[in-house]
Image (cartoon, rainbow, N blue to C red):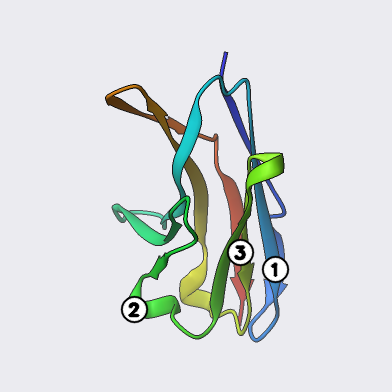
Amino acid sequence: QVQVVESGGGLVQAGGSLRLSCAASGIMYSIADMGWYRQAPGKQRDPVAGIRSGGITNYADSVKGRFTISRDNAKNTVYLQMNSLKPEDTAVYSCYVTVRRGGFLDDYWGQGTQVTVSS
């Protein structure tokens, strides 16, 4: 059974930093993509950052230059370093893991972790 567990959320003042972690367990196949989405109250869930198995990254325009995504393939873990946080970064951050199972791609999600940035 695949489990995806995030950690590292919390309350921080504007301009501060947080580091989110997301660990996947029970993976029987190879992991393709890993990444983060976020959902603010009353808004849709939006992509934040993603990283492919080869290390290629992509970011939402709103976080470029402030957030850095990385992964440790040996630990099936993805990280999101968030610097220069702004109140508009306040949201529930959810991690996803895309597993390559033969010719299929399966997505697994964590339960989310709250990030609150005070002004």
- Going by the numbered disc 1, the residue's amino acid type is Leu
Q: Secondary structure at mark 1?
A: strand
- Going by the numbered disc 2, the residue's amino acid type is Asp
Task: Return the residue at label 1.
Answer: 18
Q: Secondary structure at mark 3?
A: strand
Q: CA distance from mark 1 to mark 2?
A: 19 Å
Q: CA distance from mark 3 to mark 1?
A: 10 Å
Q: Quadrant of residue 25?
A: top right
Q: Position of residue 74 (x, y in %)?
A: 70, 42
- Going by the numbered disc 3, the residue's amino acid type is Thr
Q: Is residue 21 left or right of residue 57?
A: right
Q: Position of residue 22 (x, y in %)?
A: 63, 45
Q: CA distance from mark 2 to mark 3?
A: 20 Å
Task: Return the residue at label 3.
Answer: 116
Give the residue drawn at x 52%, y 65%: 90
Task: Return the residue at label 2.
Answer: 61
Near-viewer residue (106 or 61): 106
Q: Secondary structure at mark 2?
A: helix
Q: Is residue 39 left or right of residue 26?
A: left
Q: Quadrant of residue 18?
A: bottom right
The local crowd at label 2, few if under 14, some if 14 to 19, many if 20 or more residues have their Cα within 10 Å, is few
Q: Does 102 sit above or below residue 4?
A: above
Do the numbered discs 2 and 3 sit on residues whose CB atoms are within 8 Å? no
